[in-house]
Amino acid sequence: MWTILSTCRLQGQFNLNSIQKAGDVVLGGLFEMHFFSDFPDLAFTSKPQQPYCYGLDVLGFRQALTMAYAVEEINGNSDLLPNVTLGYSLYDNCVELGIGFRAALSLAAGQEKLFISNDSCVGAPPVLAIVGDSSSTRSIAISNVLGLYRVPMVSYFATCSCLSDRQKYPTFFRTIPSDAFQVHAIIKILKHFGWSWVGLLVSDDDYGLHAARSFQFDLQQSGEACLAYLEVLPWDNNQSKLERIVRVIKKSTARVVIAFAHESNMIQLMQEVVTQDVTGLQWIASEAWTTATVLQTPQLMPYLGGTLGIAIRRGEIPGLKEFLLQIQPTHSNKSADENDIVLQFWEHTFECKFAPAPAEWVEAGGALCTGHEDLQKIDAEFVDVSTLRPEYNVYKAVYALAHALDDLLHCEPGTGPFPGSSCATLHTLEPWQFAHYLQKVNFTTSFGDEVSFDENGDALPLYDVMNWLWLPGGWIQVQNVGVVKKSGLRGDQLHLDQEKIFWNFDPKKAPTSVCSRPCLPGTRRARRKGESQCCFDCITCSEGEISNTTDSTECSMCPEDFWSSPERNHCVPKRTEFLSYLEPLGICLTTASILGALMCAIILLVFVLNRKTPIVRANNSELSFQILMSLKLCFMCSLLFIGRPRLWTCQLRHAAFGISFVLCVSCILVKTMVVLAVFKASKPGGGAILKWFGALQQRGTVFALTCIQAVICIIWLVTASPTPHKNTEYHNDKIFYECALGSSVGFVVLLGYIGFLATLSFLLAFLARNLPDNFNEAKLITFSMLIFCAVWVAFVPAYVNSPGKYADAVEVFAILASSFGLLVALFGPKCYIILLRPERNTKKALMGRS
């Protein structure tokens, strides 16, 4: 009765192609041994059915045999699992989700009709773990179920990044990097060659769609490139869709096309590419078709030559070739399913049929298989172990399971990782316990590659970079040109041997694929409205701004005293402008100032030498000497306005100018007043007025009037002193060095006081212009004051509207013009008489008598 109660019955069986080997511990495997299936109805049946899969996948069959070889090798290794014999149960998924799913359930539940347990249907599983599946879609479906029971599954080819989700797939592992790293690797390649404008093609399944999502996200995060288009390749060979996709590729300006697709997708696509003759593209292949020999044909070489691709890490498996050469269809220890697969392989490889052969085959003269054909005499891909990639991942997956089991069996009681520091035993082993050890696996293969899993069950990221070399015969050699790997310290690393890369372009160099050409220094990027960030216009930086890097997104302002160069790529010191002694204008004004000072000195000398002559004595020689001295100061003070402004020149120039002119005008005013006083004294009763205009009073009046101007200047300098100033208001690229007035009121008061004295002198002189005197100096004073006032009235608007150095030039010109006007008007006629008409320089001539 106990036996009956402890017996579990299998409800039904699936009739599946498989390769079996018994052992103490059995490992499961799921492989693509056939391409197609004609039997969608996979219901339970108690009677064996005929095989429903056809189209032998030789490489998938080799991958399954690689797992068998790895198990045999481990069994022969005395250091690894010395007291345990491994077995295997390998199933064919026929590239069909339903078949692969049912095969996984058969592995997890077992195919035995009766299952004996101690007390219930709980115990060691029929298989310890499953190696597979090769497809992301099938792996997702299977892991969703097996994960509920914590049955470990180690895939050798499923790359979808979605499988890294430990919440959904707690016991899924893989020895191939996920698409997340493959995406990073391709972005690294894009960055390395400067390809910022690319197209993306993906297959219409989990592999392609998740890759597209990951690629778009990572591309946006990196900012290295943009997608010109994203197209999903159909599975049903929809010709209209393929034609539209190829037209999009042909029309796009992107010359780099990335394809996350399977071989079958690419075959359909390339047929249309050939039809529309779309050449000049740089293809980047995902690992799914990088080494696909079916695409390496002379017909496709003008289109796919030079392809760069990400490939699974190549490895070496010593002894595998010898194991494959031992395959024979007549071995008696093979199961019926295994022998059937071997028969199909034999017929496919040697192009023969085993007896009884179909009548039509015999009638057509087809060869019959003997089973003794020699695999060594054929040049078949099956025995070519020079580029083992998926097989190497299968090999690593089996060894990872073996190392995990070995660690589990070496657990010492009381030191285990499970509750109560317990250890798992082989007879009571539960799947989740084995998954715990599998997570901690860490070993190195004979090829030198480290095998371990991260917290998401992913292997250490490592890919080979492949290049399709177009050989002279029209065929292709897929060569390794680099490696991309992930380092904990340095992040993603790309190493390329660019000398080995074949480019299918003229000249033989990497193509350019950008939406917009890089913006050179001196310009900035301006994104085109409504378009990708990689599509932009290059706008020249504004004046005063620069960009000194390629593809700058903004221009930076130059420092205050600098301006942008004509190329707008660097800052240069601003041009400085001031009224210089070296420029023509400065030279002219300096010459005029010195000339005026020399004329004053010459006239003064003439007057000194002729001081006893009537014309000199008659017009108050002392005031004349003072006027000449003040005019000389006026000429000399104009030099303070020329040259680069300094603090002392700014403070001195206006003070010297104001005091000099006040001194001059004061002398003229006193002289005018003396003329009027003399005329008044010549009338009866007017003699008393002259006592107010003696020599002492004249000097005192001049001194007092000048002191008032001196006080104005002192107050101005103390309260708001003029200072040097850099003016950039007139021209942004120039610095005008000028003297800031400090206080406009001070300058206005200074000029106003001079104007007041000049106006007063003019009015007095005008009143005395018709006095009865043969040489009436009042006329000369009137004319000189008229010139003086006219010059300074014109000066004000000209000064206000003159920028920079021209304001100083206007002021110097006004000083010189008014000084020359006074000098010529007051002393010109006198010098004429003294030097050229000495006969008129007599008292009689001055009195109007012969």
Image (cartoon, grey):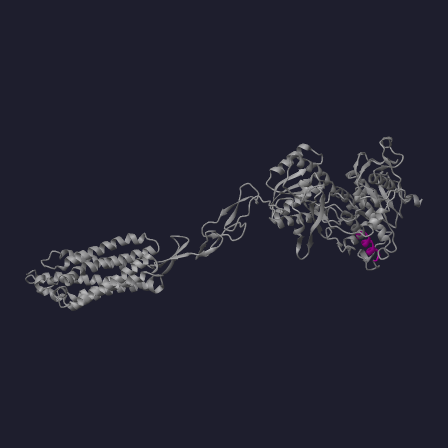
Residue farthest to the front, as pictured = 472
Residue 700 at least partly seen: no
Q: Exactly how many numbered labels are in the figure?
A: 0
Along the viewing direction, whichever of 307 and 627 lies nearer the viewer: 307
Name the residue: 18% across, 56% down. 783
In the rendered structure, which segment of residues is drawn in magenta? 400-410
Quadrant of the image for the C terminus?
A: bottom left
Q: Looking at this view, is 2 or 670 the one in front?
A: 670
* Residue 409 on the magenta segment: yes
**Residue at image point 17% right, 58% down:** 781
On screen, residue 467 versus residue 833, left or right, reads: right
How far from the left and from the top, in percent, is residue 837?
13, 61
Q: Dividing the picture into quarters, in which one does residue 251 lie?
A: top right
In the image, taking residue 372 as reference, residue 693 lies left or right, namely: left
Q: Residue 487 falls in which quadrant of the image? A: bottom right
Above or below: residue 94 compared with residue 518:
above
Q: Quadrant of the N terminus?
A: top right
Locate residue 575, reporting x and y percent.
Answer: 41, 56
State yes or no: residue 576 in magenta.
no
